[in-house]
Image (cartoon, rainbow, N blue to C red):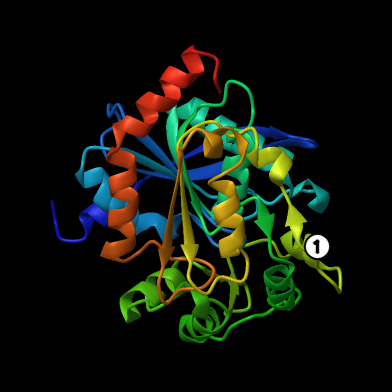
Amino acid sequence: MAQGEELRPREGSVQALGPHGFTRIAYFEWGPESASQVVLCVHGLTRNARDFDFLARRLASKGMRVIAPDLPGRGKSDWVRVPADYATPLYLAAMTAVIARSGAESVDWIGTSLGGHVGMEMAALAGAPIRRLVLNDFGARVGGVALQRISTYMRVKRRFASVDELEAHLRSIHEPFGHLTDAQWRHMAEHSAVKTGEGDYRQHYDPDIGRAFSWPLMVDIVLWNVWDQVSCPVLVLRGEDSDLLHASTVREMQKRGIAGKNGLVRAVEVRDVGHAPALMNDAQISIIEEFLADEKATSKAQRLAKLKLV
Protein backbone atom coordinates (compact mmCIF):
# COMPACT_ATOMS: atom_id res chain seq x y z
CA MET A 1 0.00 0.00 0.00
CA ALA A 2 1.43 3.39 -0.99
CA GLN A 3 2.29 5.89 1.71
CA GLY A 4 -0.87 7.81 2.64
CA GLU A 5 -3.16 5.33 0.88
CA GLU A 6 -4.52 4.14 4.23
CA LEU A 7 -5.81 7.67 4.90
CA ARG A 8 -8.11 7.56 1.88
CA PRO A 9 -11.39 5.95 2.87
CA ARG A 10 -14.00 4.25 0.76
CA GLU A 11 -16.99 6.49 0.05
CA GLY A 12 -20.65 5.58 0.08
CA SER A 13 -24.10 7.07 0.63
CA VAL A 14 -27.55 6.08 1.82
CA GLN A 15 -30.98 7.71 1.78
CA ALA A 16 -32.47 8.64 5.17
CA LEU A 17 -36.12 9.50 5.72
CA GLY A 18 -36.66 12.76 7.57
CA PRO A 19 -39.73 14.87 8.41
CA HIS A 20 -39.99 16.30 4.86
CA GLY A 21 -38.65 13.56 2.63
CA PHE A 22 -35.41 11.75 1.98
CA THR A 23 -31.91 13.13 2.45
CA ARG A 24 -28.79 11.58 0.96
CA ILE A 25 -26.24 10.86 3.69
CA ALA A 26 -22.59 10.48 2.66
CA TYR A 27 -20.26 8.31 4.70
CA PHE A 28 -16.63 7.24 4.64
CA GLU A 29 -15.32 3.85 5.62
CA TRP A 30 -11.99 2.35 6.63
CA GLY A 31 -10.88 -1.17 7.53
CA PRO A 32 -12.14 -4.63 6.56
CA GLU A 33 -15.83 -4.86 5.69
CA SER A 34 -15.93 -8.27 7.35
CA ALA A 35 -14.70 -6.99 10.73
CA SER A 36 -16.77 -8.07 13.72
CA GLN A 37 -16.19 -4.75 15.50
CA VAL A 38 -17.78 -1.76 13.79
CA VAL A 39 -17.07 1.77 15.02
CA LEU A 40 -19.27 4.72 14.07
CA CYS A 41 -17.65 8.18 14.35
CA VAL A 42 -19.98 11.19 14.34
CA HIS A 43 -18.62 14.74 14.12
CA GLY A 44 -19.54 18.02 15.78
CA LEU A 45 -21.89 20.84 14.76
CA THR A 46 -19.90 22.48 11.96
CA ARG A 47 -17.36 19.76 11.23
CA ASN A 48 -17.36 16.73 8.96
CA ALA A 49 -16.46 13.05 8.78
CA ARG A 50 -12.89 13.62 7.60
CA ASP A 51 -11.92 14.92 11.06
CA PHE A 52 -11.74 11.24 12.01
CA ASP A 53 -9.16 10.21 9.38
CA PHE A 54 -6.36 9.93 11.93
CA LEU A 55 -8.42 7.99 14.48
CA ALA A 56 -9.94 5.78 11.80
CA ARG A 57 -6.57 4.82 10.34
CA ARG A 58 -5.36 3.72 13.76
CA LEU A 59 -8.48 1.71 14.59
CA ALA A 60 -8.58 0.14 11.13
CA SER A 61 -4.98 -1.00 11.60
CA LYS A 62 -6.25 -2.97 14.61
CA GLY A 63 -8.78 -4.79 12.43
CA MET A 64 -11.83 -2.63 13.15
CA ARG A 65 -14.26 -1.37 10.54
CA VAL A 66 -14.71 2.39 10.97
CA ILE A 67 -17.57 4.36 9.44
CA ALA A 68 -17.78 8.15 9.63
CA PRO A 69 -20.91 9.83 8.20
CA ASP A 70 -21.42 13.46 7.30
CA LEU A 71 -24.48 14.65 9.19
CA PRO A 72 -27.25 16.18 7.04
CA GLY A 73 -26.21 19.61 5.78
CA ARG A 74 -22.51 18.96 6.27
CA GLY A 75 -19.65 17.71 4.13
CA LYS A 76 -20.87 15.66 1.17
CA SER A 77 -24.33 14.97 2.61
CA ASP A 78 -27.30 16.80 1.13
CA TRP A 79 -28.77 19.94 2.61
CA VAL A 80 -32.42 19.81 3.65
CA ARG A 81 -35.25 21.93 2.21
CA VAL A 82 -36.71 22.85 5.60
CA PRO A 83 -34.04 24.25 7.96
CA ALA A 84 -36.09 23.33 11.04
CA ASP A 85 -35.36 19.68 10.17
CA TYR A 86 -31.78 20.14 11.36
CA ALA A 87 -32.59 18.57 14.71
CA THR A 88 -32.37 15.32 16.66
CA PRO A 89 -35.11 13.35 14.83
CA LEU A 90 -33.42 13.77 11.44
CA TYR A 91 -29.96 13.04 12.87
CA LEU A 92 -31.22 9.85 14.51
CA ALA A 93 -32.90 8.77 11.28
CA ALA A 94 -29.74 9.48 9.29
CA MET A 95 -27.46 7.55 11.62
CA THR A 96 -29.93 4.65 11.81
CA ALA A 97 -29.84 4.46 8.01
CA VAL A 98 -26.03 4.37 8.01
CA ILE A 99 -25.96 1.61 10.64
CA ALA A 100 -28.55 -0.38 8.71
CA ARG A 101 -26.54 0.00 5.49
CA SER A 102 -23.44 -1.31 7.31
CA GLY A 103 -25.23 -4.54 8.22
CA ALA A 104 -23.82 -4.36 11.75
CA GLU A 105 -26.02 -5.60 14.59
CA SER A 106 -24.26 -3.25 17.00
CA VAL A 107 -21.70 -0.46 16.83
CA ASP A 108 -19.27 1.30 19.12
CA TRP A 109 -20.21 4.98 18.83
CA ILE A 110 -17.66 7.82 19.05
CA GLY A 111 -19.38 11.19 19.06
CA THR A 112 -17.80 14.64 19.30
CA SER A 113 -20.04 17.39 20.70
CA LEU A 114 -23.24 17.19 18.58
CA GLY A 115 -22.18 13.69 17.52
CA GLY A 116 -22.08 12.78 21.21
CA HIS A 117 -25.54 14.24 21.71
CA VAL A 118 -26.99 12.14 18.88
CA GLY A 119 -25.24 9.06 20.26
CA MET A 120 -26.55 9.66 23.76
CA GLU A 121 -30.08 10.13 22.44
CA MET A 122 -29.86 6.86 20.49
CA ALA A 123 -28.26 4.92 23.34
CA ALA A 124 -31.13 5.95 25.62
CA LEU A 125 -33.71 4.27 23.37
CA ALA A 126 -34.97 0.73 23.90
CA GLY A 127 -33.19 -1.76 21.67
CA ALA A 128 -30.49 0.73 20.65
CA PRO A 129 -27.67 -0.79 18.55
CA ILE A 130 -24.94 1.00 20.51
CA ARG A 131 -22.67 -1.43 22.37
CA ARG A 132 -20.26 1.19 23.73
CA LEU A 133 -20.45 4.97 23.70
CA VAL A 134 -17.69 7.58 23.65
CA LEU A 135 -18.90 11.09 24.49
CA ASN A 136 -16.20 13.50 23.37
CA ASP A 137 -16.80 16.65 25.40
CA PHE A 138 -20.53 16.19 25.65
CA GLY A 139 -22.72 15.25 28.57
CA ALA A 140 -26.03 15.55 30.36
CA ARG A 141 -25.72 19.30 30.87
CA VAL A 142 -24.51 21.64 28.14
CA GLY A 143 -22.99 24.97 29.11
CA GLY A 144 -24.83 28.04 27.86
CA VAL A 145 -21.56 30.00 27.69
CA ALA A 146 -20.29 27.58 25.05
CA LEU A 147 -23.53 27.82 23.10
CA GLN A 148 -23.23 31.60 23.12
CA ARG A 149 -19.65 31.36 21.82
CA ILE A 150 -20.70 28.97 19.05
CA SER A 151 -23.65 31.16 18.09
CA THR A 152 -21.30 34.10 17.59
CA TYR A 153 -19.38 32.49 14.76
CA MET A 154 -22.38 30.56 13.42
CA ARG A 155 -24.24 33.82 12.70
CA VAL A 156 -21.46 35.11 10.47
CA LYS A 157 -21.66 33.96 6.83
CA ARG A 158 -18.15 34.12 5.43
CA ARG A 159 -16.44 33.58 2.11
CA PHE A 160 -12.70 33.03 1.82
CA ALA A 161 -10.28 34.05 -0.90
CA SER A 162 -8.17 30.92 -0.42
CA VAL A 163 -7.85 27.71 1.56
CA ASP A 164 -5.09 29.46 3.52
CA GLU A 165 -7.57 32.13 4.60
CA LEU A 166 -10.09 29.47 5.62
CA GLU A 167 -7.41 27.64 7.58
CA ALA A 168 -6.61 30.83 9.50
CA HIS A 169 -10.31 31.17 10.31
CA LEU A 170 -10.50 27.58 11.57
CA ARG A 171 -7.41 28.07 13.71
CA SER A 172 -9.12 31.05 15.31
CA ILE A 173 -12.60 29.68 16.03
CA HIS A 174 -11.39 26.17 16.86
CA GLU A 175 -8.43 27.19 19.00
CA PRO A 176 -9.92 25.18 21.93
CA PHE A 177 -9.25 21.99 19.90
CA GLY A 178 -5.73 22.21 21.33
CA HIS A 179 -2.25 21.90 19.90
CA LEU A 180 -2.72 20.49 16.42
CA THR A 181 0.12 20.17 13.96
CA ASP A 182 0.26 22.32 10.85
CA ALA A 183 -0.54 19.21 8.80
CA GLN A 184 -3.65 18.53 10.92
CA TRP A 185 -4.93 22.11 10.57
CA ARG A 186 -4.34 21.89 6.84
CA HIS A 187 -6.20 18.59 6.68
CA MET A 188 -9.20 20.19 8.39
CA ALA A 189 -9.09 23.21 6.07
CA GLU A 190 -8.85 21.18 2.87
CA HIS A 191 -11.83 19.06 3.88
CA SER A 192 -13.80 22.13 4.99
CA ALA A 193 -13.38 24.16 1.81
CA VAL A 194 -15.89 24.20 -1.06
CA LYS A 195 -15.09 26.27 -4.14
CA THR A 196 -17.87 28.58 -5.26
CA GLY A 197 -18.83 29.62 -8.78
CA GLU A 198 -17.16 32.96 -8.14
CA GLY A 199 -13.77 31.34 -7.52
CA ASP A 200 -13.60 31.86 -3.78
CA TYR A 201 -14.40 29.37 -0.99
CA ARG A 202 -17.14 28.73 1.52
CA GLN A 203 -17.28 26.24 4.35
CA HIS A 204 -18.73 22.78 3.74
CA TYR A 205 -21.97 23.20 5.74
CA ASP A 206 -25.40 24.70 5.18
CA PRO A 207 -25.50 28.11 6.94
CA ASP A 208 -29.10 27.34 7.94
CA ILE A 209 -27.91 24.90 10.59
CA GLY A 210 -27.08 28.01 12.60
CA ARG A 211 -30.74 29.02 12.92
CA ALA A 212 -30.99 27.10 16.18
CA PHE A 213 -28.34 29.45 17.55
CA SER A 214 -30.03 32.70 16.54
CA TRP A 215 -31.23 33.54 20.05
CA PRO A 216 -29.28 36.42 21.64
CA LEU A 217 -29.03 34.69 25.03
CA MET A 218 -28.21 31.04 25.62
CA VAL A 219 -28.80 29.11 28.85
CA ASP A 220 -27.63 25.67 29.92
CA ILE A 221 -29.41 22.75 28.25
CA VAL A 222 -30.29 19.93 30.64
CA LEU A 223 -30.49 16.36 29.29
CA TRP A 224 -30.60 14.26 32.44
CA ASN A 225 -33.84 12.62 31.34
CA VAL A 226 -31.91 11.23 28.35
CA TRP A 227 -28.74 10.33 30.21
CA ASP A 228 -30.61 8.42 32.91
CA GLN A 229 -31.72 5.83 30.32
CA VAL A 230 -28.26 5.07 28.88
CA SER A 231 -27.22 1.57 29.98
CA CYS A 232 -24.15 0.74 27.88
CA PRO A 233 -20.51 1.32 28.90
CA VAL A 234 -19.58 4.98 28.39
CA LEU A 235 -16.29 6.85 28.09
CA VAL A 236 -16.60 10.59 28.74
CA LEU A 237 -13.71 12.64 27.41
CA ARG A 238 -13.62 16.19 28.70
CA GLY A 239 -11.33 18.96 27.61
CA GLU A 240 -9.67 20.38 30.71
CA ASP A 241 -10.73 23.92 29.73
CA SER A 242 -14.09 23.02 28.19
CA ASP A 243 -16.83 25.62 28.48
CA LEU A 244 -19.47 23.17 27.22
CA LEU A 245 -19.00 20.21 29.57
CA HIS A 246 -18.34 21.09 33.20
CA ALA A 247 -16.35 18.77 35.46
CA SER A 248 -19.24 18.68 37.93
CA THR A 249 -21.52 17.31 35.20
CA VAL A 250 -19.10 14.47 34.49
CA ARG A 251 -18.91 13.59 38.19
CA GLU A 252 -22.69 13.46 38.42
CA MET A 253 -22.92 11.31 35.28
CA GLN A 254 -20.69 8.75 36.99
CA LYS A 255 -23.15 8.51 39.87
CA ARG A 256 -26.61 8.67 38.34
CA GLY A 257 -28.58 7.04 35.58
CA ILE A 258 -28.44 3.35 34.65
CA ALA A 259 -24.85 3.43 33.41
CA GLY A 260 -23.58 5.57 36.26
CA LYS A 261 -25.22 3.55 39.04
CA ASN A 262 -23.82 0.32 37.58
CA GLY A 263 -20.24 1.59 37.40
CA LEU A 264 -20.18 1.65 33.60
CA VAL A 265 -18.99 5.26 33.15
CA ARG A 266 -15.31 6.01 32.73
CA ALA A 267 -14.11 9.62 32.59
CA VAL A 268 -10.85 11.09 31.31
CA GLU A 269 -9.88 14.76 31.33
CA VAL A 270 -7.66 15.86 28.44
CA ARG A 271 -5.11 18.49 29.43
CA ASP A 272 -4.50 21.74 27.55
CA VAL A 273 -7.71 21.36 25.52
CA GLY A 274 -11.09 23.09 25.60
CA HIS A 275 -14.12 22.12 23.53
CA ALA A 276 -13.40 19.67 22.11
CA PRO A 277 -10.44 17.27 21.91
CA ALA A 278 -9.70 16.81 18.21
CA LEU A 279 -8.94 13.07 18.56
CA MET A 280 -6.01 13.43 16.19
CA ASN A 281 -2.97 12.88 18.38
CA ASP A 282 -1.65 9.55 19.63
CA ALA A 283 -2.44 10.17 23.30
CA GLN A 284 -6.13 10.91 22.71
CA ILE A 285 -6.48 8.07 20.22
CA SER A 286 -4.88 5.65 22.68
CA ILE A 287 -7.50 6.49 25.32
CA ILE A 288 -10.27 5.55 22.91
CA GLU A 289 -8.43 2.49 21.65
CA GLU A 290 -8.07 1.17 25.20
CA PHE A 291 -11.76 1.74 25.94
CA LEU A 292 -12.86 -0.05 22.77
CA ALA A 293 -10.65 -3.01 23.63
CA ASP A 294 -12.11 -3.40 27.14
CA GLU A 295 -14.54 -6.29 26.95
CA LYS A 296 -15.07 -6.47 30.72
CA ALA A 297 -17.37 -3.47 30.88
CA THR A 298 -19.32 -4.66 27.86
CA SER A 299 -19.73 -8.12 29.36
CA LYS A 300 -20.89 -6.58 32.63
CA ALA A 301 -23.53 -4.49 30.83
CA GLN A 302 -24.73 -7.57 28.99
CA ARG A 303 -25.01 -9.59 32.22
CA LEU A 304 -26.94 -6.81 33.93
CA ALA A 305 -29.30 -6.62 30.95
CA LYS A 306 -30.00 -10.35 31.15
CA LEU A 307 -30.72 -10.00 34.84
CA LYS A 308 -32.95 -7.02 34.01
CA LEU A 309 -30.92 -4.79 36.30
CA VAL A 310 -30.51 -2.18 33.58
Is 284 displayed left or right of 162 in the figure? left
User: Where is residue 39, by image quadrant?
Assistant: top left
Q: Is residue 160 above or below residue 209?
A: below
On screen, residue 144 above or below 307: below
Q: Secondary structure at mark 1?
A: helix
**Residue, x 60% and y 51% (percent of image)?**
252
Specify whether residue 77 is in view: no
Amino acid at the residue labelled 1: Arg
Residue 150 screen position, x and y as percent: 68, 72
- Residue 61 on image: x %, y %: 20, 46
Q: Toward the viewer: 112 or 24?
A: 112
| Residue picked out by circle 1 | 211
Residue sitting at 40 percent across and 56 percent down? 52
Residue closest to the eye, 144 or 210: 144
On screen, 245 above or below 294? below
Q: Residue at horizontal 14%, vertical 56%? A: 2
Q: Residue at x 38, y 29 (%)?
A: 298
